[in-house]
């Protein structure tokens, strides 16, 4: 466990002699509102290390060093976005073992499935929802965190060998580069529609306005206490309360504190008083209605994709999702620009 700048400086010397670095992260999003980076797990041949970002020392030297190496990550999107938010601005090459596994034709590509199939290792599941911000870490949590990177380099070698046999190493390079680029984009919160949680589509008119108000109340409470929103009230409880308020039925939430109970009902009362013009509007998609000719064109593209997937033993969605196929019908040129060269080749558009 690296928890001092001196220990980090010493470890960086070890990294400088290594071409590849296996990397993973842990955050505390299940236990707080404002997600923070809690662990950085690193494995190099002969050594597994856990860096503690909560120890209060600068991590820029580590980020600078990581940018000089090829990183091996299982599912790079989450980890790189988390690291970018924590201050890591530069990323070099990445070998994503999940993408690599899918490109070899493997259909069960979770880390647990890959380690089971390649090494006969069964990962413990007990720490998946652990609070990684707590210190000290339990031995069980340390072992869980360690295993996330311990086998990654050996796994990458096996997958790389198979991809070379299949002639798909360049497919991996293209896919990883695109995935890395996508992590640079900042995902903005659509505050106007975040309240549209699972099940909200069943609510209309004033009930929808009530749900929106109660969701906003819950979000503010979660931010105030830095707790996950579901710790305040679950989504299904918000929906039920909105429906009961709308029908004039009694609403009870017994576990709320007196202050929260008061503000909860104040939020509902304010929503009840809104004029109809301020109720949420039902979202209508602007999906293009296909003509018979467009349907035929879609079926042709789908057949072409499915035949390529069967020939190369790939998940069809890896070549082109249904959404991509639909976009090809309406915006052929623009959609093809978004496809990778290997995807265009398999679809027959590489000329």
Image: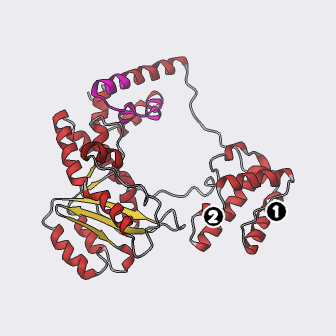
Look at 41% across and 19% down and name the residue there.
300
Q: Which image quadrant: the C terminus?
A: top left
The location of residue 257, given as percent across then percent down, is: 72, 72
Image height check: is 248 above or below 48? above
Looking at the image, tell me whether mark 1 or mark 2 is earlier in sequence order.
2
Tag on residue 248? none
Image height check: is 85 above or below 340? below
Queried whether the magenta region covers residue 321, the answer comes back as yes
Q: Which residues are magenta?
A: 304-326
For the residues marked 1 and 2, what is the alpha-carbon distance in whole angstroms? 17 Å
The location of residue 252, given as percent across then percent down, is: 79, 61
Q: Which residue is mark 1?
A: 269
Q: Which residue is mark 2?
A: 219
The kind of secondary structure the magenta stretch mainly shows is: helix
Instruction: Answer few, some or many: residues within 10 Å of disc 1's Cα (few below 14, many 20 plus, some between 14 and 19).
Output: some
Between 187 and 43, the one nearer to me in the picture: 43
Between 219 and 280, the one nearer to me in the picture: 219
């Amino acid at each position: 466990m690296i928890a001092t700048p001196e220990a980090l400086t010493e470890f960086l010397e070890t990294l400088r002699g290594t071409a590849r670095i296996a990397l993973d992260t842990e955050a505390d999003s299940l236990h707080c509102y404002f997600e923070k980076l809690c662990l950085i797990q690193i494995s190099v041949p002969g050594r597994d290390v856990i860096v503690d970002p909560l120890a209060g020392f600068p991590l820029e030297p580590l980020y600078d060093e990581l940018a000089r190496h090829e990183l091996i990550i299982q599912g790079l999107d989450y980890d790189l976005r988390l690291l970018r938010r924590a201050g890591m601005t530069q990323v070099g090459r990445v070998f994503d073992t999940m993408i690599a596994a899918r490109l070899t034709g493997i259909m069960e590509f979770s880390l647990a499935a890959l380690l089971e199939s390649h090494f006969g290792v069964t990962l413990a599941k007990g720490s998946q929802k652990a609070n990684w911000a707590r210190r000290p870490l339990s031995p069980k949590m340390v072992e869980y965190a360690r295993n996330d990177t311990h086998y990654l380099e050996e796994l990458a070698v096996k997958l790389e060998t198979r991809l070379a046999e299949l002639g798909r190493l360049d497919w991996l390079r293209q896919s990883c580069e695109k995935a890395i680029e996508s992590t640079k984009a900042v995902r903005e919160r659509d505050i106007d529609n975040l309240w549209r949680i699972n099940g909200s589509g069943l609510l209309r008119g004033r009930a929808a306005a009530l749900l929106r108000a109660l969701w906003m109340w819950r979000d503010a409470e979660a931010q105030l206490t830095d707790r996950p929103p579901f710790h305040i009230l679950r989504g299904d409880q918000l929906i039920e309360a909105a429906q009961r308020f709308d029908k004039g039925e009694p609403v009870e939430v017994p576990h709320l504190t007196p202050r929260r109970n008061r503000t909860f009902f104040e939020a509902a009362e304010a929503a009840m008083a809104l004029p109809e013009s301020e109720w949420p509007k039902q979202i209508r998609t602007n999906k293009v209605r296909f003509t018979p000719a467009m349907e035929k064109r879609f079926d042709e593209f789908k057949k072409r994709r499915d035949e390529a997937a069967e020939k190369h033993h790939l998940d069809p969605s890896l070549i082109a999702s249904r959404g991509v196929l639909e976009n090809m019908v309406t915006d052929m040129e623009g959609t093809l620009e978004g496809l990778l060269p290997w995807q265009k080749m398999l679809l027959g558009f590489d000329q």
